[in-house]
């Protein structure tokens, strides 16, 4: 699945997207817009329950910003009913924490991001230079 993102459009067109710029009517996002996110805060507002292949899955969708370009991914578990339990959320939280080892979790609006520590420190340097 290919996801068209405003920051990709800017890089492909040769334009540079900065905070507040719009590309094709979409506001470009700056990594400085991301706020700290604690995986312990995973709840029903950040997850989806999906039935697929005869099984019920609890999914935590997020943007993986660790690679060369951001990609949508999810972390999930199979659950034993139509709704997630407290135990299901605890297990999912452990998986989210494990997935974030060596990186940091951030959130903007209602979308979690996993970013590298170098992006994190680069964001702090950009903020200090202003």
Image (cartoon, grey):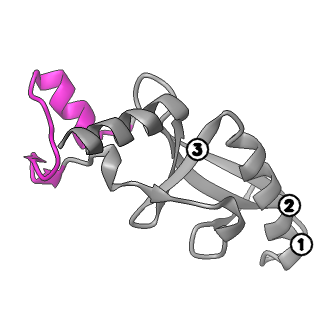
- Residue situated in front as seen by the camera: 89 or 53: 89
In the rendered image, residue 45, in percent from the top left (x then y), is placed at 57, 75
In the rendered image, residue 1, in percent from the top left (x then y), is placed at 46, 36
- Residue situated in front as seen by the camera: 87 or 107: 107
Quadrant of the image containing the C terminus: top left
Residue 17 vs 28, above or below: the answer is above
Q: Is residue 29 left or right of residue 78?
A: left
Give the magenta part as a residue range: 3-27
Q: Is residue 110 magenta?
A: no
Residue at coordinates 19% horizontally, 33% vertically from top-left?
Answer: 9
Residue of label 2: 91
Residue at coordinates 72% horizontally, 51% vertically from top-left?
Answer: 96
- How far apart are the two marked residues, 1 and 2, measured between alpha carbons? 6 Å
- Residue situated in front as seen by the camera: 102 or 11: 102
Q: Secondary structure at mark 1?
A: helix
Residue 98 vs 119, above or below: the answer is below
Q: Is residue 29 left or right of residue 13?
A: right
- How far apart are the two marked residues, 1 and 3, measured between alpha carbons? 24 Å
Q: First in sequence, mark 3 or 2: give its number.
A: 2
Q: Is residue 91 left or right of residue 22?
A: right
Residue of label 3: 104
Q: Quadrant of residue 3?
A: top left
Residue of label 1: 87
Q: First in sequence, mark 1 or 3: give its number.
A: 1
Q: Secondary structure at mark 3?
A: strand
Q: Secondary structure at mark 2?
A: helix
Residue 17 visible in the picture: yes
Residue 1 visible in the picture: no
In the rendered image, residue 90, in percent from the top left (x then y), is placed at 84, 67
In the rendered image, residue 88, in percent from the top left (x then y), is placed at 84, 68
């Amino acid at each position: 699945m290919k996801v068209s993102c405003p920051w990709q459009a800017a890089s492909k067109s040769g334009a540079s997207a900065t905070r507040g710029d719009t590309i094709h009517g979409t506001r470009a996002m700056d990594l400085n817009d991301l706020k700290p996110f604690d995986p312990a805060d995973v709840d029903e507002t950040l997850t989806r329950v999906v039935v697929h292949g005869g099984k019920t899955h609890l999914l935590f969708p997020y943007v993986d910003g660790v690679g060369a370009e951001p990609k949508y991914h999810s972390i999930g578990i199979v659950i034993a009913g139509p709704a997630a339990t407290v135990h299901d959320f605890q297990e999912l939280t452990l998986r989210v924490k494990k997935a974030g080892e060596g990186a940091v979790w951030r959130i903007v609006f209602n979308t979690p991001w996993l970013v590298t520590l170098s992006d994190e420190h680069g964001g702090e340097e950009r903020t200090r230079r202003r």
